[in-house]
Image (cartoon, rainbow, N blue to C red):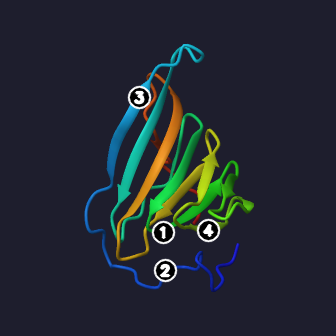
Amino acid sequence: MTPEASPHAEAADSPTKPTGPVVRHILSSTHPASAPGETFELVQYIIPAGAELPVHTHPGVQMATVESGSLTYHVVAHGQVTVTRAGGAEETIGPGEQALFCVGDSWVEPVGMVHFAENRTIAPVVLISSSLLDDDAPPAALVQTPPER
């Protein structure tokens, strides 16, 4: 996917270093009777200006939407992300591709897909995410030897 002159074009203003840590707020969490051994969470992530998230996977399906800001998202390997843009258009981002996610864009990450994201702007990005994970699993697992990016 190539950025064009649109709301999804790459942000030009990029700080040289992160302005703080990524913050993860659990907004709600439950253990659904229909999914024994699983935790269903609703989480808010605040990604500071200049932050780059490490290359990682999720042990369960995760869905997210941009509440504010814009996020550059990279699929590295093992799957593809399905994106629904704020206006309703759908697209798929696969290995080796990147996309800019803006307010109202949402996506579904499959289990085990290797990916990372970065905030190339001068303002924080706020995401709302829901995940269905094994009770004993962390929300993400770092990829120790990431493929070439």
Q: Earlier in the sequence, mark 1 or mark 3?
A: 3
Q: Earlier in the sequence, mark 1 or mark 2?
A: 2
Given this view, does label 4 or label 1 mark the residue nearer the observer? 1
Up-down relation of residue 116 to residue 15 (above or below): above
Up-down relation of residue 136 to residue 54 (above or below): above
Between the C-alphas of marks 3 and 2, the distance is 34 Å
Which residue is located at x 62 percent, y 38 percent? 111
Identify the secondary structure beneath mark 1: loop
Identify the secondary structure beneath mark 3: strand
Number of on-image labels: 4
Q: Earlier in the sequence, mark 4 or mark 1?
A: 1
Residue 99's disc is 4
Q: Which residue is mark 3?
A: 29
Q: Earlier in the sequence, mark 3 or mark 4?
A: 3
Name the spot of residue 141 as percent of width and height, x first.
47, 41
In the rendered view, does 135 fall on the left or right side of 99?
left
Between the C-alphas of marks 1 and 2, the distance is 8 Å
Q: Callout 1: 10 Å neighbours few (<14), some, many (20+)?
A: many
Between the C-alphas of marks 3 and 4, the distance is 29 Å
Q: Callout 2: 10 Å neighbours few (<14), some, many (20+)?
A: some
Between the C-alphas of marks 1 and 3, the distance is 26 Å
Q: Earlier in the sequence, mark 4 or mark 2?
A: 2
Tell me the kind of residue under disc 2: Ala
Residue 11's disc is 2
Tell me the kind of residue under disc 1: Ser
Name the spot of residue 38 as percent of width and height, x first.
52, 21
